[in-house]
Amino acid sequence: MNNIQRILVVIDSENDNERAGGELPIELQKAMRLISDKSSTELHLFSVAYQKHLHHDSLSWDFDQGEKRQEYCDLLAKNLQSLATKLKSEGYQVSSDSVWAYPRYEAIIAKAEEIAADLIVQHTRSYGKLEFHHLTNDSWQMVRHCPLPLLLVKNDPWNDKPALLAAVDPMHSHHKPLALDNRILDAAVTLQARLSGKLHVVHGYAEAARPFAPAGVIEAEHRKVLDELLSAYAIEPEQLLFLDETPVSALQQETYKLKTDILIMGAISRSRLSEMLVGSTAEKVLDFLGTDVLIIKPRQP
């Protein structure tokens, strides 16, 4: 993600059609902030239309399903075109497209690959209760299956100089591919440059996880590989958070302390089952964080 030239912005067909005062969808607002040169970066607005009661397999007393479905799709396409026209008038390079498809995530990934997107921006549409910020099933499927960088955004706007937190695991637990930490840091540095953000890097080593190791050995092992990883990056000592915590605890604590706008982290598949699991840290924190999250996957073989 060193060079962002094409951004696929997923416009929610259910929630973004009606916006007070003509305000742009938050996912589009945030995607626009990632553009440093309007002439060299393309925005592609994409929406997946689907209504169960209008699907051809749905049982219904309404014999005008086909006509209503077309009206629904036409309205969606019109709204997307209206957004595109507005942005074009401001100098942005914009295209728009919509499809009727299910499951939704498959259509999004296919479109991203078709246009060779460098980044997908999607609203999570979380349904938070109390301290929880549960992702919808659709968002989880994107995390599991999307091979491209995926920015899951929520409703809160970013600060003028967003706080960025990159989570790395240089010990490569759970058989993490060697290149993933570098991809995480590359993406974090790119966001820092695009947003003039404040970047921190966090790693939790949890010495208590190996209670029989001599004192200090775990810390020294993790510090050595972390220093090797960061040697290629201009990360100042005050930007590094090297904590005697589990990765999950470290992320939960530091995102809150730093008032993080965007957490950059990796996710990997640990199963060949059809419903693949993502890396254990991602599984445990995504539903509990109120921050936006940029998910980075290993390089495709």
Image: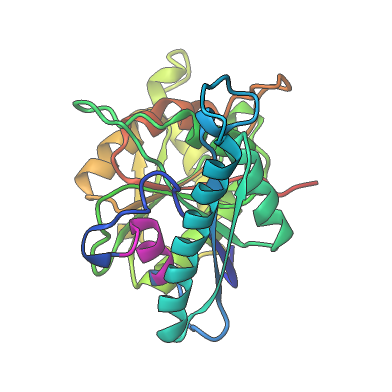
Up-down relation of residue 169 to residue 3 (above or below): above
* Rendered image quadrant of residue 194: bottom left
Q: Residue furthest top?
A: 212
The magenta-colored residue range is: 24-32
Residue drawn 48% across the image and 36% down it:
139
Rendered location of residue 215, percent (x, y) = 40, 24
Residue drawn 27% across the image and 27% down it:
132
Up-down relation of residue 256 to residue 259 (above or below): above
Q: Is residue 193 magenta?
A: no
Residue 17 vs residue 168: left or right? Answer: left
* Rendered image quadrant of residue 104: top right
Rendered location of residue 155, percent (x, y) = 28, 49
Colour scheme employed for the rendering of this structure: rainbow
Rendered location of residue 185, percent (x, y) = 52, 56
Does residue 260 appear in the picture of this structure? yes
Up-down relation of residue 93 to residue 163 (above or below): below
Does residue 10 appear in the picture of this structure? no
Rendered location of residue 257, percent (x, y) = 20, 45
The quarter of the rendered structure image containing the N terminus is: bottom right
Of residues 53 and 169, the one drawn nearer to the viewer in this rendering: 53
Up-down relation of residue 98 to residue 101 (above or below): below
Residue 50 vs residue 204: left or right? Answer: right
Residue drawn 47% across the image and 37% down it:
220
Residue drawn 51% across the image and 52% down it:
227
Dominant secondary structure, magenta: helix
Of residues 14 and 286, the one drawn nearer to the viewer in this rendering: 14
